Image: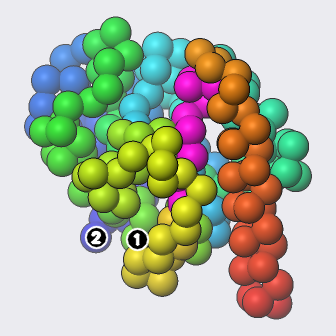
Amino acid sequence: MLNWSELEKAVNECKKCELYKMRNNIVMGDGDKKADLLIISEAPGKQEDLTGKPFVGKSGLLLDKILASVDLKRDEIYLANIVKCRPPNNRNPKESERQLCLPYLRNQFALIKPKIIVCLGRVSAQTIIEPSFKITKQRGIWYERKNCLIIATYHPAALLRDSTKKRDVWEDFKNIKSKYDELKKTQL
């Protein structure tokens, strides 16, 4: 396992797939590096690639509102992606790209030691929970692996395209916040 500076250096120097050729910046992650709550998306978008920070575009603004609605703040969680470089035209990362980048995310997980993982969207859930994951049928269900609770919900980008999903995400995040608060109480 690498420490944070070694991990960032390894990701910055990564040339395992073709995505490195098109990136402006890697998007390592952002937030509390000892957070109990880790939110994982599939890949950086255009704004994230330009800034090197996750969730700074329209989806990020919506995620901030979602977090605020359940009294969570960015500085108490950690945000990461499956792949650290933006796929062209914001396409979903290919399976091969995800598998090549996954060791970096696993290293982040080992360093952060979160108690809860929230997968945003199908691609994240299929990578983290199970390859056959169906976001429309399995979102909002808790899973447990390696002493960590895992749940998936729709990606904020999906809400920007289809506002009927907002209610589901609201319910999921209330559930997440409730579980998060339970864990915090047991740590006292």
Mark 1 crowdedness (10 Å alpha carbons): few <14, some 14-19, many ≥20? few
- In the rendered structure, which amino acid carries the disc numbered 2? Met
- Depth-wise, is mark 1 or mark 2 nearer the camera? 1
Residue placed under numbered mark 2 in the picture: 1
Mark 2 crowdedness (10 Å alpha carbons): few <14, some 14-19, many ≥20? few
Which residue corresponds to the image point at 51% horizontal and 23% vertical from the top-left? 48
- Locate residue 177, reporting x and y percent: 77, 62
Picture disc at residue 125: none
- Locate residue 135, reporting x and y percent: 46, 44
For residue 17: magenta?
A: no
Left-right relation of 144 to 93: right
Residue placed under numbered mark 1 in the picture: 110
Left-right relation of 62 to 69: left
Query: Could you tell me which secondary element the residue under label 2 belongs to?
Result: loop
Left-right relation of 62 to 30: right
Task: Write the start and end of the magenta stretch as one range.
Answer: 151-159
In contact (CB < 8 Å): disc 1 and disc 2: yes
- Considering depth in this image, is 9 or 101 the residue closer to the camera? 101
- Considering depth in this image, is 43 or 155 the residue closer to the camera? 155
Which residue corresponds to the image point at 43% horizontal and 65% vertical from the top-left? 109
- In the rendered structure, which amino acid carries the disc numbered 1? Ala
Q: Quadrant of the C terminus?
A: bottom right
Which residue corresponds to the image point at 69% horizontal and 26% vertical from the top-left? 164
